[in-house]
Image (cartoon, rainbow, N blue to C red):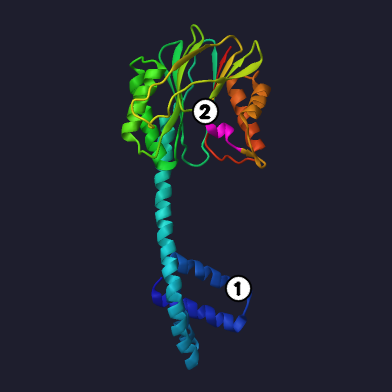
């Protein structure tokens, strides 16, 4: 449609409304408005268009004609704002496209299958609070009865977190082939993160290795949220203790290695702080309250236990997820 055709259509719409003043003409104005927006017609151009269309319908009083000059000048400011919004919208769409690509890349880095070893049941749930997640987890299978796992929380969100996640993924894959212990893995990862990550960012992590032949879990902690150890014989939960600075905080950090043995029915629950850090009403959720929820689900298979806990905690916080949520459960069968 040419500018002349548009002006003709606008004039016809004004003439029909002057004669009929009906709903059909108002509906036609709405449809024309959509066409003008699709053609990126600015407010000041619309004011000029209206003035020219009036001229087509007959003599226009001089004061009315002159008033359109004032209206056009005012509309110029509206037009500048409109163009700014249009430019922002284009940049926003481009950013959304880039985030979608980064999110897909992030998902591709995460393992698609859980480890399968005799005598141990593994459950996992990981839900991002937004499109991009700052939580990371990984599994590395060594043989038929041994696998390593990592659960981490990266400060920040968005594309920087996705880039950090890819760095951690490839570092862990390379170190996993060296058969190092968890403490040495964290020490090497700390060097990688400290050298390559922005000083304002850091990573908390638990790295461990499970041996299903003897049902022992050897692990080390880098400033991460403590997990839980459930002893079936005592029907009691213990904090999974560990010390060590978060990755990227200080060069040359060392980490202590710990080991726990699992008896039949015992469980290990590893998590990120998105599980525990939530508000219930006006108060913050406490670890002691989480234990009571864990107690109610501890008899279920690992995956079912993880799913149930997520649903119960989501309901508790009125379906708000303030932070990324990740939980790994290892249960000796």
Circle 2 residue: 225
Which quadrant: the N terminus? bottom left
Image position, residue 314 (x, y; %)? 62, 36
Say which residue appears at 44% left-offset and 12% top-offset.
146
Q: Is residue 40 visible?
A: no
Is residue 277 within the magenta segment?
yes
- For the residues carrying marks 2 and 1, which lies nearer the camera in this image? 2
* Secondary element at image label 2: loop
Circle 1 residue: 24
Say which residue appears at 52% left-offset and 28% top-offset.
225
- Span shown in magenta: 271-278
Q: Residues within 10 Å of mark 1 (few under 14, many from 20)?
A: few
**Horizontal placement of 102 versus 290: left or right?**
left
Q: Earlier in the sequence, mark 2 or mark 1?
A: 1
Residue 251 occupies quadrant = top left
Which quadrant: the C terminus? top right
Q: Residues within 10 Å of mark 2 (few under 14, many from 20)?
A: many
């Amino acid at each position: 449609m040419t500018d002349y055709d548009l002006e003709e259509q606008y004039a016809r719409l004004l003439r029909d409304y002057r004669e009929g003043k009906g709903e059909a003409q108002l509906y036609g104005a709405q449809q024309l408005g959509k066409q003008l927006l699709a053609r990126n017609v600015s407010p000041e151009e619309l004011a000029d268009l209206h003035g020219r269309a009036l001229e087509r319908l007959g003599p226009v009083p001089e004061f009315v004609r002159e008033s359109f000059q004032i209206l056009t000048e005012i509309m110029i400011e509206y037009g500048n704002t409109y163009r700014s919004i249009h430019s922002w919208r284009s940049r926003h769409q481009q950013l959304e496209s880039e985030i979608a690509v980064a999110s897909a890349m992030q998902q591709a880095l995460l393992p698609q299958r859980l480890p399968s070893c005799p005598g141990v049941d593994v459950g996992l749930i990981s839900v991002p609070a937004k499109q991009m997640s700052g939580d990371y987890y990984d599994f590395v299978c060594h043989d038929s009865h041994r696998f390593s796992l990592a659960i981490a929380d990266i400060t920040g969100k968005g594309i920087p977190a996705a880039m950090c996640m890819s760095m951690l993924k490839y570092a862990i894959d390379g170190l996993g082939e060296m058969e190092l212990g968890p403490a040495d893995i964290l020490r090497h990862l700390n060097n990688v993160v400290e050298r390559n990550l922005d000083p304002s960012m850091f990573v908390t992590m638990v790295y461990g290795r499970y041996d299903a032949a003897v049902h022992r879990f050897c692990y080390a902690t880098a400033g991460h949220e403590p997990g839980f150890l459930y002893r079936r014989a005592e029907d009691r939960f213990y904090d999974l203790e560990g010390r060590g600075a978060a990755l990227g905080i200080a060069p040359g950090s060392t980490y202590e290695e710990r080991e726990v043995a699992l008896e039949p029915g015992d469980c290990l629950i590893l998590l990120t702080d998105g599980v525990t850090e939530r508000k219930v009403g006006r108060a913050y959720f406490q670890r002691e309250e989480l234990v009571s929820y864990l107690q109610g689900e501890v008899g279920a298979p690992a995956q079912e236990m993880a799913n149930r806990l997520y649903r119960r905690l989501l309901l508790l916080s009125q379906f708000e997820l303030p932070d990324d949520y990740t939980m790994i459960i290892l249960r000796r069968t």
